[in-house]
Image: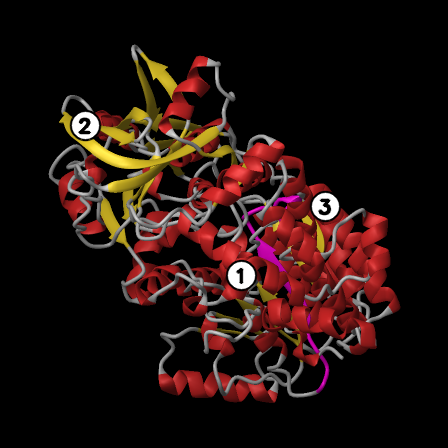
């Protein structure tokens, strides 16, 4: 790009003034390749900034009592440097300019070793305080500058401070090789020319009704706010944009499904209902019955069902799903259930086969481990309609799988499957009709997320546990008490109880984590030497896993040492004890799932979390799982601790993470965006108007692939 080329949204980062090859590489490490990325790289916070001052001004500021909480910047030469070692390393420097000196102090400063030297010309920024007879800055930010070249921002900040008082200075997400100050300078270089060319996709009338600034003005308010209120108003507009684009996509997809697609309308009679319920060796709970009626209502229509079935661990979701699958079979159609792991698929197949024993429905299992000859036979009978029910893993999504008349696809643990995979199931149908889709999760989804990632789904909740489930006593135990824990387990096992011991890895780890084989040897030769112990993990062949699990169910194994392979689907009522090693390394939802393997019998169940959390987040997770057994409470807590980015399949869904919106904090804004999107799609189903072309392009770029909008309009 020539030096005279105008700066626009397509300008590469290395074409900006002052950005050479080395700095451009540092920008790219932060995901910033051009001005569009830089525009979206928003400040993480703001500091009140008095601008550039002399050291003499700093002394005067302190004498007057200063601007509470405000930052100041000074430039000078490092005159002296010393390191003080104690419990924490402290580095002290004396900075001087023509007007005086100021002390700089950094605590926990090992990272500074070798980087600062006397004679260096640096700029520092931070809060100024008095310490004894000294004026000092503690842990200031610093950057190397040339003694001959003035700070290009100094005049700007000084002028701003003189006219308006302390300014709200943006602090950007940065790196060791790229400071916030450098990012600020790059933003300054491109902001005005880029904003002059930035078009707004929202109509002026809507902005006026919502009291929101234009898109260019919102970016200016966030990057260069006059004050914190200015920054908040700009951020609100950008957060609304993110939420609105997603809701428009969700509503567009939802309308397309309801208006343009057709599914088999299934029969549901009293006789069918009585026959299906007679296959279960238990009565459905009131909650299960209510959800069955909701699902059956959908299946009787020719609009493809798209329903999310939520229920806590052990609530009986599989029985409800099987009921729906048998509705399809009873009307001459096929049904499929897709599980995320071969172990869960095997368990589904075994339990369903048990319910259907002696009946006429045919059931098959298809996983990646299915032998080639058996696979060919299953696929042929599936295509001809001879197989009524099929249970499978991702193998059901592979090439060559085709159904004759698939009426219902059930997707278990849906957060492990993306939108594309769910769409692939629909495309396996031989005719043009689309199957009904039921997705299940034992990881309850907070309401804020159910309105976003799963906003096109109708929701059913099983909010009642079957009779006989007992409360689980969950305790946190330090790793140093491991011997006590296993001695206690040995005592309980001697009375006839069974236990799970969950470890994070299969093989010995360089991190010193408990592994399956090592733990088997340690327990078998130590505290549990008189117990019958076995191990299980996902790498074992299917037949070995089946033998082990059947022996555990039969009471022939006292203690099962396993990885998270037992996380879902395992039901052994006599197993009432669980130890989770290195519990701080597991996610909150995963801990809840694991714990749900016990508490299925009449006796008291105890879950012991062995761990030594080293972060606030890990401590919060363990406290949350200790204090509640309610999956919905835990899900809300998980959202609060981690945010929505990695929860409930946000990554698997392919949806772009929010850059600005924060859930659940922005729930009110989300509800507004959802209402606006619903009204917008009602009057313009595919955003086909000339004045909507820019909005449609930006929607398709942001979410078109993830939401599968290519077939809409």
Q: How far apart, in angstroms, are the residues tagged by discs 1 and 3?
A: 30 Å
Which mark sits nearer the N-terminus, 1 or 3? Answer: 1
Q: Is residue 601 shown above or below 593?
A: above
Q: Quadrant of the N terminus?
A: bottom left
Residue at image coords 63%, 40%: 226
- Crowd around label 1: few <14 · some 14–19 · many ≥20 (10 Å): many
Q: Is residue 284 visible?
A: no
Q: How far apart, in angstroms, are the residues tagged by discs 1 and 2?
A: 40 Å
Q: Quadrant of the C terminus?
A: bottom right
Please name whichever residue, 1 or 180, is drawn nearer the observer in this view of the structure.
Answer: 1
Q: Is residue 136 visible?
A: yes
Q: Which mark is residue 89?
A: 2
- Crowd around label 2: few <14 · some 14–19 · many ≥20 (10 Å): few
Magenta stretch encompasses residue 248: no
| Magenta-highlighted residues | 432-449
Q: Secondary structure at mark 1?
A: helix
Please name whichever residue, 172 or 519, is drawn nearer the observer in this view of the structure.
Answer: 172
* Residue of label 3: 669
Q: Residue 273: horizontal and vertical position, in percent?
A: 75, 60
Which mark sits nearer the N-terminus, 2 or 3? Answer: 2
Please name whichever residue, 72 or 504, is drawn nearer the observer in this view of the structure.
Answer: 72
* Residue of label 1: 190
Q: Residue 356: horizontal and vertical position, in percent?
A: 57, 65
Q: Secondary structure at mark 2?
A: loop
Q: Which mark is residue 687?
A: none
- Crowd around label 3: few <14 · some 14–19 · many ≥20 (10 Å): many
């Amino acid at each position: 790009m020539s030096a005279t080329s105008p700066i626009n949204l397509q300008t590469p980062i290395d074409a900006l003034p002052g950005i050479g090859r080395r700095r451009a590489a540092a920008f790219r490490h932060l995901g910033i390749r051009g001005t569009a990325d830089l525009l979206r790289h928003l400040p993480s916070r703001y500091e009140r900034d008095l601008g550039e001052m002399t050291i003499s001004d700093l002394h005067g500021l302190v004498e007057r009592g200063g601007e509470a909480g405000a930052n100041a910047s000074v430039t000078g030469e490092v005159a002296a440097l010393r390191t003080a070692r104690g419990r924490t390393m402290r580095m002290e420097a004396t900075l001087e300019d023509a007007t005086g000196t100021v002390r700089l102090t950094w605590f926990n400063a090992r990272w500074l070793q070798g980087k600062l030297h006397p004679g260096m010309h640096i700029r520092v920024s931070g809060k100024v305080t008095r310490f004894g007879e000294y004026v000092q800055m503690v842990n200031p930010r610093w950057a190397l500058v040339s003694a001959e070249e003035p700070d290009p921002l100094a005049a700007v900040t000084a002028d701003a401070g003189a006219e308006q008082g302390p300014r709200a200075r943006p602090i950007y997400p940065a790196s060791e090789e790229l400071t916030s100050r450098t990012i600020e300078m790059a933003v300054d270089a491109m902001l005005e020319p880029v904003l002059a060319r930035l078009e707004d996709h929202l109509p002026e009338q809507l902005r006026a009704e919502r009291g929101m600034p234009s898109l260019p003005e919102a970016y200016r308010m966030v990057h260069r706010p006059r004050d914190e209120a200015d920054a908040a108003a700009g951020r609100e507009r950008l957060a609304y944009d993110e939420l609105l684009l997603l809701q428009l996509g969700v509503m567009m997809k939802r309308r397309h499904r309801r208006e343009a697609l057709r599914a088999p309308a299934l029969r549901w009679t009293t006789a069918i209902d009585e026959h299906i319920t007679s296959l279960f060796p238990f009565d459905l709970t009131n909650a299960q019955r209510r959800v069955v009626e909701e699902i059956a209502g959908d299946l009787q229509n020719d609009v493809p069902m798209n329903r999310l079935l939520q229920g806590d661990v052990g609530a009986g979701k599989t029985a409800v799903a099987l009921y729906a699958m048998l509705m399809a079979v009873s009307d001459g159609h096929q049904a499929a259930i897709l599980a995320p792991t071969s172990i869960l698929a095997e368990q589904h197949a075994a339990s369903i086969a048990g319910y259907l024993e002696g009946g006429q429905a045919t059931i098959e299992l298809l996983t990646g481990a299915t032998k080639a000859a058996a696979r060919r036979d299953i696929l042929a009978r599936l295509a001809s309609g001879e197989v009524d029910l099929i249970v499978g893993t991702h193998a059901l999504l592979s090439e060559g799988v085709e159904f004759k008349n698939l009426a219902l696809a059930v997707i278990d643990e849906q957060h492990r499957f993306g939108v594309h995979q769910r769409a692939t199931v629909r495309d396996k149908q031989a005719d043009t009709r689309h199957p009904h889709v039921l997705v299940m999760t034992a990881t309850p989804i907070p309401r804020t997320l159910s309105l976003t990632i799963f906003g096109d789904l109708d929701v059913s909740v099983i909010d009642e546990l079957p009779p006989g489930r007992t409360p689980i006593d969950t305790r946190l135990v330090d790793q140093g008490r491991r011997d006590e824990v296993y001695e206690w387990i040995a005592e309980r096992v001697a009375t006839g109880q069974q236990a799970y011991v969950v470890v994070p890895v299969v093989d010995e780890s360089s991190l010193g984590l408990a592994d399956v084989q090592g733990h088997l040897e340690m327990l078998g030769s130590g505290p549990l030497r008189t117990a019958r112990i076995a191990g299980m993990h996902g790498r074992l062949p299917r037949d070995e896993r089946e033998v082990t699990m059947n022996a555990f169910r039969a009471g022939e194994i006292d203690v099962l040492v396993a990885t998270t392979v037992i996380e879902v689907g395992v039901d052994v009522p006599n197993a009432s004890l669980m130890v989770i090693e290195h519990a701080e390394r597991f996610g909150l939802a995963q801990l809840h799932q694991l714990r749900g393997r016990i508490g299925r019998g009449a006796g008291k169940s105890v879950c012991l979390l062995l761990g030594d959390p080293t972060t606030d987040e890990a401590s919060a997770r363990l406290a949350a799982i200790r204090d509640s057994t309610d999956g919905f409470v835990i899900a809300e807590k998980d959202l609060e601790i981690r945010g929505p980015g990695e929860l409930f399949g946000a990554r698997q869904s392919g949806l772009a993470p929010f850059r600005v919106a924060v859930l659940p904090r922005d729930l009110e804004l989300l509800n507004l965006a959802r209402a606006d999107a619903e009204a917008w799609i009602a009057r313009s189903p595919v955003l086909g108007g000339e004045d909507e072309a820019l909005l449609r392009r930006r929607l398709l770029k942001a979410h078109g692939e993830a939401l599968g909008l290519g077939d809409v309009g």
